[in-house]
Image (cartoon, rainbow, N blue to C red):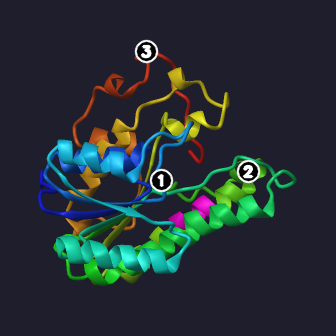
C-alpha cells in the first residue's frame, strides 16, 4: 500500500471527530495536515480546537497548519488555501468533512438552520473543492473525498429530516458531477459514509437519539479513508464508498476493534 508521507491534506472540520481521526491517521505517515475549522476555543459540549488538533497531529509525526476557517465565507477559504500552498508547496488531497446537522421535520426546521446546513454542507463542499482544484491538478495522485452518503432516493430518507437530507445529498451530487468532470484530468472524487452510526461529540450533542454503546468509533472511518486516499486516483473515482466494505476489501475481518462496546448491536446509519 502507498503512503501519505509528504502529502498535504486540506481537511475541513478537522478540529475534532472524524476529521481529526483522518488527520491523525495520515499524520502517522508524516503527512502535512491543514486543519480548516472554526473552533479556536474549547466548547463545553464540543471539545477540541484547531490548536489542540495541531498538537495531536504533530505528536504523531505529522506537520500541522491550524487555520480558523468558516467555510461559508469564500474569502476565508481562499485565504486558507493560499496559506496552505505557501506553507507546504501545494495541496494533494481535499477532504470535505465539515457538516451541519439538524434532524428536524419541515415544520420544525427554521430557515436559519436550513440555510446553515446548505451553506456548510453543499455550498461549503463546492467552494472548498473549487478552491483546491487548481492545486490538485498539479499534484501527484490527487483526491477529493466527501464525507457524504450514497444517493439513495427513497422517500423515507426525506420524510423526517428533509432539509438535512437535501444538504447532505448536495455533497454527494458534487461527487457525481466532479468525478465525471475531472475523469480525464486525474483527480479522483469520491464519497465515504459509515455503515453504522459513529460516536462523536457532535452526535452526543444531539442528546439521547442514539445510545453510545450501539455505535462504532471514528477510527473505522479514518482507516477506510486512508485506504481510499492511498489508491491510484486514476483508477478510483466516482465511488460512494461504505467504510466497512472498503476495509473488508482491504482484508480486514476484525470489526470488533471499532465498536464502542464490543458485542453490542450496532445501529445502521442514515441513508443505508
* Nearest to the observer: residue 74 or residue 134: 74
Decide whether the magenta segment is chiefly helix, strand or loop.
helix
* Residue located 54% across and 75% down the image: 73
Residue 79 within the magenta-colored segment of the rendering: no
Residue 243 visible in the shown view: yes
All told, the count of numbered labels is: 3
Q: Secondary structure at mark 1?
A: loop
Q: CA distance from mark 1 to mark 2?
A: 26 Å
Disc 3 to disc 2, C-alpha distance: 30 Å
* Distance CA(mark 3)–CA(mark 1): 35 Å
Report the residue marked by disc 2.
161
Where is residue 216 drawn, in percent x and y? 44, 30
Q: Which region of the structure is painted magenta?
A: 167-172
Q: What residue do we see at 23% from left, 69% from top?
A: 92
Query: Does residue 142 appear to the left or right of 117 in the view shown?
Result: left
Q: Is residue 246 visible?
A: no
In front: 130, or 46?
46
Quarter of the image holding residue 87?
A: bottom left
Mark positioned earlier in the residue sequence (3 or 2):
2
Q: Quadrant of the C terminus?
A: top right
Q: Which residue is mark 1?
A: 39
Question: Which of the two marks, 3 or 1, is nearer to us in this view?
Answer: 1
State which mark lies toward you, 1 or 2.
Answer: 1
Q: Which mark is residue 263?
A: 3
Q: Earlier in the sequence, mark 1 or mark 2?
A: 1
Amino acid at each position: 500500500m502507498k503512503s501519505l508521507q509528504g502529502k498535504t491534506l486540506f481537511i475541513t472540520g478537522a478540529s475534532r471527530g472524524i476529521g481529526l481521526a483522518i488527520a491523525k491517521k495520515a499524520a502517522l505517515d508524516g503527512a502535512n495536515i491543514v486543519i480548516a475549522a472554526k473552533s479556536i476555543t474549547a466548547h463545553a459540549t464540543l471539545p477540541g480546537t484547531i490548536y489542540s488538533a495541531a498538537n495531536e497531529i504533530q505528536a504523531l509525526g505529522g506537520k500541522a497548519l491550524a487555520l480558523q476557517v468558516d467555510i461559508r465565507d469564500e474569502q476565508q477559504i481562499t485565504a486558507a488555501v493560499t496559506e496552505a500552498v505557501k506553507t507546504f508547496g501545494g495541496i494533494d488531497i481535499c477532504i470535505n468533512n465539515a457538516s451541519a446537522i439538524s434532524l428536524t421535520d419541515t415544520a420544525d426546521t427554521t430557515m436559519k438552520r436550513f440555510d446553515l446546513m446548505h451553506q456548510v454542507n453543499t455550498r461549503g463542499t463546492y467552494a472548498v473543492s473549487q478552491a483546491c482544484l487548481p492545486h490538485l491538478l498539479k499534484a501527484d495522485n490527487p483526491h477529493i473525498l466527501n464525507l457524504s452518503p450514497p444517493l439513495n432516493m427513497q422517500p423515507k430518507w426525506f420524510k423526517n429530516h428533509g432539509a438535512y437530507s437535501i444538504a447532505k445529498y448536495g455533497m454527494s451530487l458534487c461527487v457525481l458531477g466532479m468525478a465525471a468532470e475531472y475523469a480525464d484530468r486525474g483527480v479522483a472524487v469520491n464519497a465515504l459514509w459509515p455503515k453504522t452510526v459513529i460516536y462523536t461529540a457532535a452526535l452526543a450533542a444531539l442528546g439521547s437519539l442514539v445510545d453510545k454503546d450501539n455505535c462504532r468509533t471514528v477510527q473505522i472511518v479514518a482507516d477506510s479513508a486512508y485506504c481510499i486516499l492511498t489508491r491510484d486516483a486514476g483508477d478510483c473515482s466516482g465511488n460512494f464508498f461504505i467504510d466497512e466494505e472498503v476495509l473488508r476489501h482491504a482484508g480486514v475481518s476484525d470489526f470488533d476493534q471499532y465498536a464502542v462496546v464490543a458485542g453490542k448491536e450496532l445501529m445502521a446509519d442514515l441513508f443505508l
